[in-house]
Amino acid sequence: MEGASATEALVVDGHLDERAWERADVQSGFRQLTPREGAPASGKTEVYVLHGAENLYVAARLRDETPSKIRERLTRRDNLNNADWFLVSFDSNLDRETAYTFGVSAGGVQYDALRTPNNRNSSWDAVWKSAVQRTEHGWAVELSVPYSMLRFPEQATQTWGVHFTRRIPRLGERSEWPLIPRSERSNRVSNYGRITGITGIEPRPNLQIRPYSLARATAEEDPQNPGSATMSRSVDVGGNLKVGLGPNVTLDVAVNPDFGQVESDPAVLNLTAFETFFDERRPFFVEGQQYYQFDVSGGDLFYSRRIGSKNPIIGASKFSGRTNNGLSFGVLGATTGGSFSPSRGYGVARLNQQFDRYSSVGGMLTAFDGPRAGNEGRERSVGAGGDWDLRFRNNMYAFRGYSALTHQRWTRGGKDPTTGFSGQMEVEKQEGIFQVKANAKVTEKEFDPNNVGQLTRDRTDFAEFFATYDYDVNGGDPFGPFRRATLGGSVAQTYSVEDRLSRRQFIIFKSKFRTKGFQDISISGRLFNFLDSYDLFETRGLWPRNRKYHLRTNVGGSTADTRDWILRTNGDYTIRGSEGNEYAVSIGADWDATERLALSGTLQGEWERSVLAWSSNEAFKATEEGFKIGTEASPPTELGASDYTGFGGSGALDRILDSVPLHSDNAYYVPVYGERDTRSLDLTLRSTVAFTPRLSVQVYSQFFLAQGEYDNFKVLTDKDHIAPFPSYPKESRFLFDNFQSNVVFRWRFHPGSTLYFVWDHTRNERREFSNLEDKRAAGTRTNFGDRIRSPFNVFPRNSFIFKIEYNLGYEDLI
């Protein structure tokens, strides 16, 4: 496609009546990705691109045989809803990895995103203009993007990558120019078309100052007077600064940032030994995420939600960009602490050099300094790694890998310094109807990036061999009742590096089908631990346990996505050998109730039946009167003589603990297991009312109940044997009640400037029962149905936030 210049500024109104559009090169010839890959698009699309002195202009005429059926449904910005859409993506650096996407719906809603090889991030928020108009033959769209929103080299004549997409949801159609087949979409940016002859443009400085002012009022239960409310009020000011320091370099600074407008994290039931991780939603950290990605061992060397998790963020800054020779870089620093008193510091630096079109090598360095738990001295850690992604045969094959180290040290009597290693090598055939990948990875027990990064303990102390495949049935073409189908699977074997124990192995089979009526069906099966396998972490620091096999099956489906409503169902059933069963069923729906109202909801239930699971680690002390149990589930070294008590049936421990080594002073410390029954109910509802493309109200609500009870207790005597312990004197039950709702009013009253009003309502309580009373007398099973109203008996926490954020862009400041 040949670029053309606009000698005068254009009025962005969707009419395309300026003479400049007549001089522009027209691009048509769109072809379908769905429903019939490669077929001509059902409606003709003509796209024009002009480059002016300050802005890049794009226009499209989108013809439709039945214009009355064009969907103009409104939604909030950056939500790709079930309306007709036109999207354009520019690889302005021509790095074949990163692209800026701009989209406009037939209703005038804007969408922008930053595409990287791994994902498309719609939290990237640019300042640009667009307009749409209905025509007698369909609709037209016009948009202008300031050069300050893009990054491109400083060259006299430029060539950019470009890609256009049109969506017609009532037909289930997605058409593109150029068409990128499914078998070649592993890095779709590398397959973009080209727009050539771009001359006479220069990178513009991207200067944005976004101050904010916020007022917050919070009402919650008074801890000194339970049952009554206490009110707190605060006023905050802060802001973000974005400065373009060159054609491809940007500095971002945040001072006292606030993220009160971000949707709440969902409530989850976590009965594992590991932390729950949530996606980053805060705009400052989401924007530019592509510069800081470094995957390690199923985690990340940098996980931005660490910053601000302990204390409020005082200040943060990012310096990122890309040079003309393909070197991308990112440097981030942040400090947190209460009352503007810095207590924790975070630092991240990332480099990545691209070469030979698709290949790259890079490295990352992270650093942390903060107080130890209990403020006993300080903890300092660093992480460092190098990674590579080498492509061959025109991007069909890839050889990837990384090597990383972490080092931690403590002051004032902490542990000895530790250093750990993690590494991986992977080969992949990533294009074609048959794709296959194999890798080998190893991670030492001491590898711990979690002060700045993200890694669960079960992803340490292991060596793993993994292979996976994906196959497009019938070459991806329709057959029988199906439009397309894919089959896939994987196998893996994992060993402990330290103990040389088999940790797990699995075989997975999965399949997906799309019918000619646009319904989706998925079926999968997973077989785990069919050979001896040991869980190293379930006992929270004591010895491993031999896990029985478990077989998990899953069936899911959805109705046609061409309608105003979509119904989704999913069912899971897991057999854990002789160690119980698990069930999960969910049903969800999306409904465009009107042109301005969209509703969605999901109802999910989960059950466990007699699942053998860890309950606690208990101290037992041998005395002349028999065995006694610690009143608290703590190691014997933390218990005194008065912290033990006798119980009936303790004589059974003579045989059970006969082969268990003493922990200290005639005391044993052993894992106690029980057969666990759990039930949980999760109802999540979302609704969006869009009054205009710039004015919307979004409501998120979650109702979550969970309860569990252990019975038929056992003692794990070594890694291969577990002994019944019917006289265990403690009960073990828990109840979790949660209701939370988040209402966000957004008004984008000026490009890049937004007014928010947020109401956050939360009621949650977790109760755990673990006492020395006889469990049969102390606790009876709670009727799950009677607990439906229980979250509403919890004292609520209400937070009201009024925030205004104003964008002072370059054009406003000169």
Image (cartoon, rainbow, N blue to C red):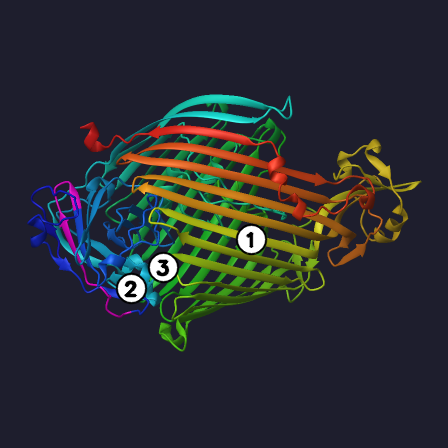
Distance of label 2 from label 3 (alpha carbons): 22 Å
Image position of 757 (left or right of 525): left
Query: How far is disc 3 from disc 1 in space, using C-alphas?
Result: 42 Å
Residue at point 34%, 66% (across, down): 182
The N terminus - image quarter = bottom left
The magenta span reads: 38-56
Is residue 814 visible in the rendered structure shown here? yes
- Tell me the quarter of the picture where residue 735 sits: top right
Residue 604: mark in rendering: 1
From the viewer's perspective, is residue 377 above or below residue 130? above
Name which of mark 2 and mark 3 comes first in the sequence.
2
Does the segment drawn in magenta span residue 512? Answer: no
- Residue 643 relative to residue 261: left or right: right
Provide the secondary structure element on which disc 1 rests: strand
State the image coordinates of residue 282 (x, y, percent, origin top left).
41, 38
| Residue nearer the viewer, 191 or 572 | 572
**Residue ID at (37%, 32%):** 756
Taking the view exactly as shown, the residue that stands out farthest to the right is: 624
* Position of 564 relative to 774 (above/below): below
Q: Which residue is mark 2?
A: 180
Contact, CB < 8 Å: mark 2 with mark 3? no
Callout 2: SS: loop
321 and 87: which is toward the camera: 87
* Percent x, y of residue 42: 24, 66
Image location (x, y in percent) of residue 623? 90, 40
Q: What is the crowding at mark 3: few (fewer than 14 residues within 10 Å), some, or many (at least 20)?
A: some
**In front of the other: label 2 or label 3?**
2
Label 2 is placed on what type of residue? Answer: Ile
| Earlier residue among tags 1 and 2 | 2
Residue 390's tag is 3
Say which of marks 3 and 1 sits in front. Answer: 1
Q: Residue at x 29, y 57 (%)?
A: 189
